[in-house]
Image (tube, rainbow, N blue to C red):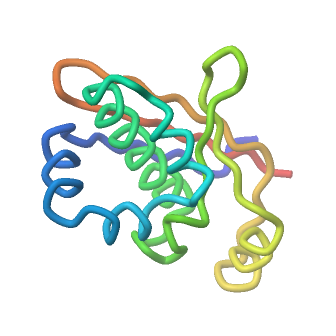
Amino acid sequence: MISGIGIDIVGIERIKYLVENYGDRFLNRVFSSTELNNIYKIKNKNNIEQKIAGFFAAKEAFLKSLHIGLFSIPLNCIKISNKQSGAPFLFIDDKIKKFILDTYNIKIGTINLSISHDNGLAIATVIIENI
């Protein structure tokens, strides 16, 4: 059974502005070191900005799917990566799951994530299923 759905759309130019003007301060607040290592492996600068925007949208969509506010959970604790196939997935560790349960009384089961990019925009949808 679905317990939450979240969607977010981000302008890639907005993310480019944040990275150019706030650099590591922005990136470290939003992304884990593992995410940043994966992002920095991308050779094409446009693809980096697209990836950052998609991951940012996914994190906001996740929080919306829980019906809690932005920064209710540190964004760098919500981890996005890609499977071997290229499909994105979202991971939160047991400590964060416990925090969500204790603070918001929300049990998190399966997290489904989709990210897409087109025409200067990145969009992400998250669907949370009950345990």
Residue 15 x %, y % = 22, 48
Q: Is residue 119 left or right of residue 72?
A: left
Residue 63 x %, y % = 50, 60
Quarter where residue 108 is shown: bottom right
Point 75% across, 76% down: residue: 101
Quarter where residue 42 is shown: top left
Task: State whether residue 57 is above or below residue 105.
Answer: above
Q: Is residue 2 left or right of residue 121?
A: right
Point 71% across, 69% down: residue: 106
- Residue in the foreground of this view, choosing between 31 and 97: 31
Q: In this view, does 88 lie to the left or right of 51?
A: right
Residue 43 x %, y % = 39, 25
- Residue in the foreground of this view, choosing between 26 and 1: 26
View extreme (bottom): residue: 103
Point 37% across, 42% down: residue: 52
Task: State whether residue 16 is above or below residue 115.
Answer: below
**Quadrant containing the N terminus in the rendered view:** top right
